[in-house]
Each structure stands twice: as C-alpha cells, then as structure tokens.
Amino acid sequence: IYVLFYKRGEKMENKKRVLLGMSGGVDSSVSAILLKNAGYEVIGITMRLFEDESFVENETACCSLSTINDAKRVCHKLGIKHYTYDFREEFKKYVIDNFIDEYKSGRTPNPCIMCNRFLKFGKMYELAKKLDCYYIATGHYAKTEYSEKYNCFVLKKSDNILKDQSYVLYPIDKELLPHILFPLQGFESKDDVRKIAKENNL
C-alpha cells in the first residue's frame, strides 16, 4: 500500500525534500508516513490563519491552535521537523475579504478554492523554495500525473471518487504541478488511510 513517489525523468537516488502541509488530522498525518517511507526528507508546516479567540477555542476549525499542537505531536512521533507560519494577513486578504466582496455581489464563493490557490499552493510553495524543498505535498484527495497527450503534468480526480477534492484545486498554476505530491491519490477508501494511522499509533 505504500507507494514510491517520483516524477518523470528523475532518478530514485536523487530524492528531494518535501514540505508537507499538516492539519494534525489523519489525512496529512498518513501523508507524512507515506512520504517518509518512500524515502523523502519531510518537513511539516501548519499555517496560522485566524486572529481572534476562536483560533484558541475552536478545536474543529482548520488550522486552529489544537490542529497546530496535533501536527507538532505527529511530527515529533515521526521524527520530522515541523514549523508554524503566520499567514493571518494573507488569509484575510485572499480569502476573507474576497468572500465578503463576492457575497455582497450576490455570489456564493468557495473559500477553500482561494485558500488553496493563494496559500496552500501559493505562499506555501514560496516557503518551500526558501527551505530548499523541491516538492510540496498535502493530504488532499487528488492526483497529478504526466500526460503524454498534453506533454505536461495534469491535475486529475482522486481514485477515491467520494473524497475527491480536485474541484477545489483547479486554479493551481499548471507550472507548479510537477512540484506537487498527493500521497493519498491512490487510495480508494478512507478506511485504508485510517488503518495506516492505527498501525503507526496515530
């Protein structure tokens, strides 16, 4: 079930560093396990996105204080580095303000699309380059693969069609696709992901 990830034309002995976005949940945690088992040097990152007291109190919110602590515990257990970066200003600019403007205009925006475009696959990639990471990775259910037809990497639906998240990833810059890993892309069942977490005492 563990997959060895590599990109077209790269030799396996030239494995790269990868910056993994982590929420502390099962998907990103298992992604860390898979990447590490595949021989990558994994660095975990969790984004701080909120400014008010809900950041501390809301345990279910994306990237709340509890998710940061969970991610740090997972990384400590797996023996990988973990960093928390403050992206509150960028989150307000690209996600919250955009949501308000769209809503006022009578449209119903999807904040995940903007967050993925500008933060998880924007600012995070900029940070990856600063940390000398060739790849970025997330626990999204989607896949990238090289297309002979189009002579480039393309974004495709996950094998787990019920969990597929490719529809919130469509604005990703296509030039970035060769540098993205989705470790869960080949899983057809969330139960298989949970099984790996349980086997590793997570």
Image (tube, rainbow, N blue to C red):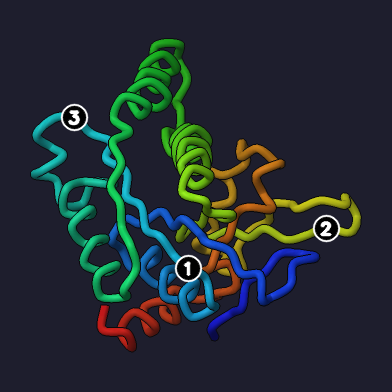
Q: Earlier in the sequence, mark 3 or mark 2?
A: 3
Determine whether the residue tagged by mark 2 lies in a helix, strand or loop.
strand
Q: Position of residue 113 (x, y in %)?
A: 50, 37
Q: Position of residue 200 (x, y in %)?
A: 32, 84
Disc 2 marks which residue?
147
Determine whether the residue tagged by mark 1 lies in a helix, strand or loop.
strand
Q: Relative to the observer, which residue lies in front, 104 or 44? A: 44
Disc 3 marks which residue?
51
Disc 1 marks which residue?
41
Determine whether the residue tagged by mark 3 lies in a helix, strand or loop.
loop
- Tell me the residue at 57%/44% (across/down): 169
Residue 144 vertical placement versus 188 (above, below): above
Other residues around mark 1 within 10 Å, as few (<14) / some (14–19) / many (≥20)? some
Report the mark closest to the observer, 1 or 2.
Answer: 1
Residue, far right: 149
Q: Earlier in the sequence, mark 1 or mark 2?
A: 1
